[in-house]
């Protein structure tokens, strides 16, 4: 762990304000990235930041203050500001003093890493990306191509007046490949090799994400899509690859189930939710095949952690079980407000934001169907991979998604490519039409690097995992419709 961050935490305890309760979250953030686009090396990105978020409770009021001045005088000024906000909010707060969580855990958590980022010299990383660029540029039809390799490390120390001392160290690996093909008025895009599938861990994750080996295949698909037929239109069977299930889970399960959104906190910014508090425990969200978990147990997933940013221990919970809605995605503070159980998902994106309810590792659990059996069961449908566009209404109910690649399914067989595959629906109807869930062989870990929420905005990492899934009676259409 970062010795400096720990030393600041120890020093703060000596000057902490005399209040009913306080927490201090200290963060050291490091991010690096290397990229090559069209064979040209781009500027190397380096970012490093230290900062602290202080929360105080005085009576029925709660206040926050953040500072990058980690000297004793800087922390004192932040404490004074937080106390001032707590006193001002005491008459209008949502909670009473005894309702605020009082974490007291003492623990450590660290991302397992087999091959550290710095084991590969910069010149070798550049060579790796240049070789990927060469593999992507397979013809003159490829008009833009790039390879990217990023790394992040967040070291966090969380302490509280109740005696909590939680140290966590997260390391992220973020590779991606992309190819844009063009012919006349037709342009197609393919991505992969870790694109929207970043993970926790070290360089050992690259091979698992098919980076950079996926480059040539992605470019070939981009070129082939230029002359592919448009996606057919009509109500039909739809098979979604895990690379598309990521966004389907994220937008039509994750966001509508965030408890602070259900309570109205996001209404002015990113909308509300079609889900209401009385639905939990009885509402049929999907077919009996739909099982969704909040699962911090996949250490390679983006949002795995030991404790959330309110100091609550993370443990696996069913969010939807056999299609029935079980519990919301709400941290300890929101759980008190709503008087219902949630999960440990109060999270802050960076050091100068307070924690809010965020989906973390939200996964569709595997079923018992092989992908081959799913395809064989379909007379007429479309298979789709990798999200390209999305739109969803303010209540996270009606949606429309576009994908990078489609394949027609006819008489139980995957046929040729189709371009501009799209589909739309209503969340409850769509999930209730879930007809088959792939087994563990197709279960794939992925995630979202830039989930935005909150005022002021917080962009955060979210983990998702899913097998291939089959849906009946979906409105499918192509780019020409």
Image (cartoon, helix red, strand yellow):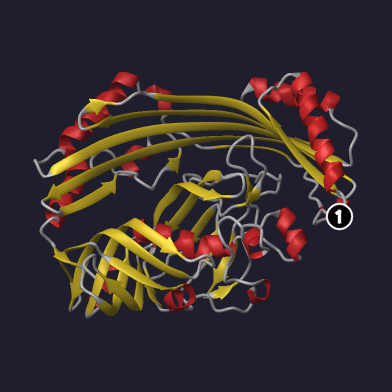
Question: Badge 1: few (under 14), some or many (20 or more) residues near its Cα, within 10 Å?
Answer: some
| 431 relative to 372 in the view: left or right | right
Q: Name the image quarter holding residue 10.
A: top right
- Can residue 410 be seen? yes
Front in this rendered view, residue 15 or 77:
77
Q: Position of residue 353 (x, y in %)?
A: 64, 40
Q: Position of residue 40 (x, y in %)?
A: 23, 26
- Report the quarter where the C terminus lies: bottom left
- Can residue 370 be seen? no
Q: Residue at x 55, y 79 (%)?
A: 284
Count of numbered tags? 1
Q: Is residue 221 above or below residue 421?
A: above
Label 1 sits on a secondary structure element that is loop
Q: Residue at x 55, y 69 (%)?
A: 320
Q: Position of residue 188 (x, y in %)?
A: 20, 52
Q: Is residue 380 above or below residue 251?
A: below
Front in this rendered view, residue 268 or 42:
268
| 35 relative to 460 in the view: left or right | left
Q: Residue at x 30, y 43 (%)?
A: 193
Front in this rendered view, residue 36 or 122:
36
- Report the quarter where the N terminus lies: top right
Report the residue marked by disc 1.
96
Q: Residue at x 47, y 34 (%)?
A: 113
Q: Position of residue 459 (x, y in %)?
A: 52, 44
| 458 relative to 334 in the view: left or right | left
Q: Is residue 193 above or below residue 119?
A: below
């Amino acid at each position: 762990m970062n010795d400096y961050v720990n030393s600041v935490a120890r020093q703060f305890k000596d000057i902490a304000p005399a209040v009913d309760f306080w927490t201090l979250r200290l963060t050291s953030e490091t991010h690096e990235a290397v990229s090559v686009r069209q064979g040209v090396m781009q500027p190397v990105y380096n970012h490093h930041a230290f900062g602290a978020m202080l929360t105080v409770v005085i009576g029925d009021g709660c206040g926050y203050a953040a500072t990058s001045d980690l000297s004793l005088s800087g922390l004192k000024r932040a404490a004074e500001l937080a106390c001032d906000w707590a006193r001002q909010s005491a008459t209008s707060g949502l909670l009473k003093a005894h309702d605020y969580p009082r974490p007291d855990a003492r623990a450590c958590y660290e991302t397992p890493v087999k091959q550290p980022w710095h084991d590969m010299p910069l010149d070798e990383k550049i060579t790796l990306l240049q070789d990927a660029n060469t593999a992507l540029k397979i013809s003159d039809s490829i008009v833009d191509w790039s390879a990217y390799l990023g790394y992040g490390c967040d070291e966090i120390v969380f302490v509280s007046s109740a005696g909590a001392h939680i140290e966590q160290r997260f390391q992220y690996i973020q590779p991606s490949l992309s190819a844009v093909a063009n012919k006349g008025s037709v342009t197609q895009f393919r991505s992969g090799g870790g694109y929207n599938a970043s993970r926790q861990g070290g360089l050992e994750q690259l091979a698992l994400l098919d980076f950079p080996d996926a480059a040539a295949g992605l470019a070939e698909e981009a070129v082939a899509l230029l002359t592919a037929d448009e996606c057919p239109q009509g109500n039909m069977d739809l098979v979604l690859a895990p690379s598309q299930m990521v966004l389907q889970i994220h937008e039509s399960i994750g966001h509508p189930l965030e408890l602070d959104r259900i309570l109205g906190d996001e209404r002015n910014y990113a909308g509300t939710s079609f889900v209401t508090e009385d639905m939990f425990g009885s509402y049929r969200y999907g077919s009996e095949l739909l099982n969704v978990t909040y699962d911090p147990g996949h250490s390679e997933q983006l949002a795995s952690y030991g404790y959330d940013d309110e100091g609550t221990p993370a443990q696996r919970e069913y969010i939807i079980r056999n299609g029935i809605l079980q519990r919301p995605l709400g941290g300890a503070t929101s759980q008190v407000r709503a008087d219902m159980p949630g999960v440990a998902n109060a999270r802050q994106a960076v050091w100068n934001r307070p924690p809010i309810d965020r989906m973390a590792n939200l996964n569709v659990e595997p079923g018992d169907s092989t992908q081959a059996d799913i395809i064989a069961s379909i007379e007429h449908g479309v298979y789709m991979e990798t999200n390209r566009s999305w739109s969803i209404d303010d209540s996270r109910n009606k949606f429309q998604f576009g994908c990078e690649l489609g394949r027609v399914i006819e008489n139980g067989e995957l046929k040729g490519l189709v371009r501009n595959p799209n589909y739309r629906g209503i969340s409850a109807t769509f999930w209730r039409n879930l007809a088959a869930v792939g087994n563990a062989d197709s279960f794939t870990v992925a995630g979202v690097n830039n989930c935005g929420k909150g005022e002021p905005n917080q962009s955060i990492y979210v983990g998702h995992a899913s097998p291939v899934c089959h849906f009946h009676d979906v409105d499918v259409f192509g780019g020409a419709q």
